[in-house]
Image (cartoon, rainbow, N blue to C red):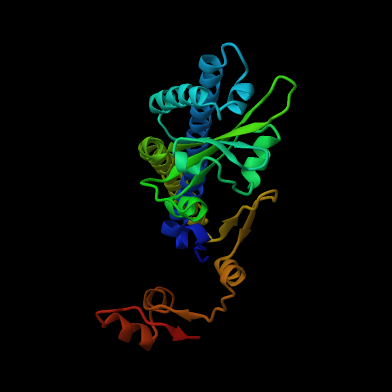
Amino acid sequence: MRNQTSFIDRNFGMTVLFVFIVLFVPLMVREWISLRAEGMYNVEWHTTSMARLLERDLAVNRSLPDLISNLKNPETFDNFDNHVRQKIGFLGLRNIRIYDLSGEIIYAIDKDFIGKIFLPGENRNAAFAGNIVSELIDRDEYFDEYSQESSSDMAEVYVPIIAEGGEIPYVIEAYFDYTPITQRTNLLLIKSAASLLVTTLIVLVLLIYLYKGRQKMSRQVEALEAILPICMYCKKIRIEGEGQSEEWMNVESYFAEQDDLEFSHGICGDCLQKHYPDSKVAQKSAKKTNPVANIPV
């Protein structure tokens, strides 16, 4: 009987690599998405905190929307500007702009932008609808939008400023240097990759050990199945099938059934001398150093 090898046996190395990729890559992608989402949440939290601090520190006697609407007053503007500059340094923000519904910039750290009108984009419209919106913006995108150079990639965040009646007359646009969060995310990703790699390799080693153990057991079973019970007298072979009764079959019939073999008959030199000792062929065969010879009958 021929030993049939499975696909895994023939491609064991490729199978191990495939299992590694299936286990490791999705976990790493999930970890990267999770860490990125955490980073963006931190950016939104910083920017939202900026708006809340402005409300707490500046809106003592009047609401923040009323205060912003009065920024054309030089004294009010200077007071507001000083507070904003203190807070952005504390919170790590790079830039602040405040838009009204028309798209005009009411306030900006860079005073050259004050009074300019920018068409509202999708994120700013979403902020005027009451949502906090954030996205990563690289240096090229920042330059294309504002014709101004940026020293690093940043997170752009829009926070609505809600008036007492629920209206949203203004939106704060803040930019946060994303570099520290990127560095932290990369460090955490490297640590997670190392941990996941070790865990995945342990799982693979365990699977390989179990597979090799199963292979060894299969070989032992095959070796046991390869042992043919044969009668010590008549030389018939015992056949045992699952769910079948025991059967004894002569050698010729067994191998003809298993391997589609056909037999021809002859007589070896030993048997020739034993059964036909007086024949000339037997006497001649006995003189040879190798007495075995198949002689057709």
Q: In this view, does 51 lie to the left or right of 192?
A: right
Q: Residue 40, image x and y in percent? A: 51, 35
Q: Is residue 103 above or below residue 249?
A: above
Toward the viewer: 256 or 194?
194
The quarter of the displayed image where residue 72 is located: top right
Q: Residue 36, image x and y in percent? A: 49, 39
Q: In this view, does 147 lie above or below 179?
A: below
Say if residue 69 shows up in the picture: yes
The quarter of the displayed image where residue 132 is located: top right
Q: Is residue 242 above or below residue 280?
A: above
Toward the viewer: 118 or 269?
118
The quarter of the displayed image where residue 270 is located: bottom left
Give the number of callouts: 0
Toward the viewer: 150 or 236?
150
Q: Residue furthest right?
A: 165
Give me the residue at 55% from left, 66% from top: 251
Q: Which residue lies furthest to the top in this view?
A: 61
Toward the viewer: 213 or 123?
123
Give me the residue at 54% from left, 25% from top: 51
Q: Residue 169, image x and y in percent? A: 68, 31
Q: Residue 121, image x and y in percent? A: 63, 47
Give me the residue at 53% from left, 17% from top: 58
Say if residue 223 shows up in the picture: no
